[in-house]
Image (spheres, helix red, strand yellow):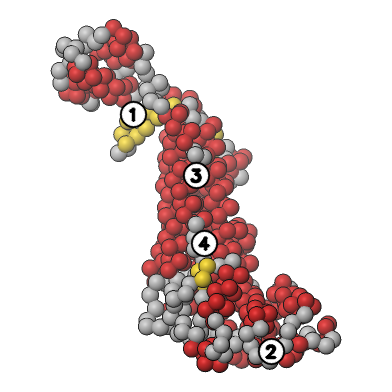
Amino acid sequence: MEAAFDLTAMQHLADSPIALGSLDGRYRPVVAPLVDYLSEAGLNRARMFVEVEWLIHLLDSQVLPGAPELTDRDRHYLRTQVAEFGADAVAELAEIEAETRHDVKAVEYYLKRRLDAAVDPLGETALSQVHEVVHIFCTSEDINNLAYALVIKGAIEDVWLPTARGLREDVTVLAEEHADLPMLCRTHGQPATPSTMGKEMAVFAHRLSRQIKRVENTEFLGKINGATGTYAAHVCAVPEVDWQEVARSFVTKLGLQWNPLTTQIESHDWQSELYADVARFNRIAHNFATDAWTYISLGYFHQNLAAQGSTGSSTMPHKVNPIRFENAEANLEISCALLDVLSATLVTSRLQRDLTDSSTQRNIGTALGHSLLALDNLRRGLAGIDMNAQAMAADLDSHWEVVGEAVQQTMRVAAIAGAEGMEDPYERLKELTRGHEVDAGATAAFISSLGLPSQVEERLLKLSPATYIGIAPELVQHLGK
């Protein structure tokens, strides 16, 4: 009788609070900081914040004829509703949304309930008189675009960027500590002109730094201008008010940059730019992960099993698998795929509005979560490696042919200066090195046979693969400039 994997005969796991995805499952501890910003609850709290601040802004600006003035206690009460927006608020809001079938409308009704409840802690208050000020002149996207801008800004500045900077600093430390450590380079996978490990790490640190600067310079835009971005209802209801200035001052007060020209939606171009920059950072980090994996394979990086905190292979106890770097690769690829979709699709909206962006933007947390998880794995991986200088030295000593480049170029310079017997340097070095094992003795004999000026010959005879590193150590000093 065959064994059947029959789910209908098993207990339904869906009846338990079990995560469907890995970010909310095994990787939750790493990505948990993003929940405050990019979860549904985090977004609703930001919506609540925007609704409250718009209410306060309008009443404090006295642009609504006959509207009451707020006291300091009123403002404190309103802002407390945002500060204390927790599990109970989330549950109540969910109940309201089950009736409204509209997420932003649910926030509006939730805030109105809080206005009604203000009399208990405050006594006499104007808040019970301002129901109609809540959400006035707003389309849902006025609230949504500002809420999304705030939570994305927070997630990037408070969570993603510190981790990205941490990786950059980890790589910078490697660069500075090993600026003088010689290593054999490989171009096209073949032995090539040596460098230092520090200089190669500095290249990555420099690349990551450039992308971090781009992300740091992100423009987080926002708008609050009505159903099609014309302030039509505003000027019809209260024509004497400068509504552009009211909108500009409100958006900038939130710490965002005002976008003066939109349709019903803020066009999301800034989001597209941001996600492209984060994806580019991811891809550089992915390149770093593959190089680190290769250095481990070559023996240049030695993995400290205790620091890695892993078992290694399940059947081959001699192995320490580079799982941190492999995990980083996978999550960076997933993150980039999602960021690419976000970047490509969010710039398009049919005519003045469609809802494709609504579903798309709900995946921002997942996209950044996989990036955050990958960067965390890279940092953990780097924390568990040591440099194997002996392995690098042995590799260099077995590839004396790389010094041939220096000999060839020196012969060219000598020929230009008038030295005789320097003809066909490339061909002569190719005959010596290609397909042949070349050691220190063969290299020295070849150099001595050339008839170079004595000072030049002496300089070349002192050269070895380990010393043929140019000014690699000095180049590391460009970091931080």
- Residue at 49% x, 51% y is 213
Look at mark 2 in the image and give the residue it sits on. 67
Nearer the N terminus, badge 1 or badge 4?
1
In the image, residue 369 above or below residue 176: below
Q: Position of residue 440 (x, y in %)?
A: 33, 15
Place residue 447 in its image quadrant: top left
**Where does label 3 land, which residue?**
322
Within 10 angstroms of label 4, few (less than 14), some, or many (20 or more) residues? many
Circle 3 residues within 10 Å: few <14, some 14–19, many ≥20 = many
| Callout 3–callout 1 Cβ contact below 8 Å | no
Q: Where is residue 17? Give x, y as percent.
A: 63, 73
Instruction: Determine which residue is flagged by label 1.
Output: 193
**Disc 3 to disc 1, C-alpha distance:** 27 Å
Residue drawn 70% across and 75% down? 82
Q: Are marks 2 and 4 in contact (CB under 8 Å)?
A: no
Closer to the camera in the image, 95 or 278? 278
- Sequence-first tag of 2 and 1: 2
Q: CA distance from mark 2 to mark 4?
A: 43 Å
| Nearer-the-camera pick, 26 or 180 | 180
Mark 2 or mark 4: name the one nearer the start of the chain: 2
Three-letter residue code for mark 3: Pro
Task: Name the mark on residue 368.
Answer: 4
At which x and y percent is residue 153?
56, 64
Between 55 and 431, the residue placed more toward the observer is 55
Name the residue type under label 4. Leu
Of residues 457 and 400, the one nearer the viewer is 457
In this view, 153 is above or below 260: above
SS state under label 4: helix
Residue extending farthest to the front is: 240
**Hey, which residue is sitting farthest top in the picture?**
454
Q: What amino acid does circle 1 point to? A: Thr
Mark positioned earlier in the residue sequence (3 or 1): 1
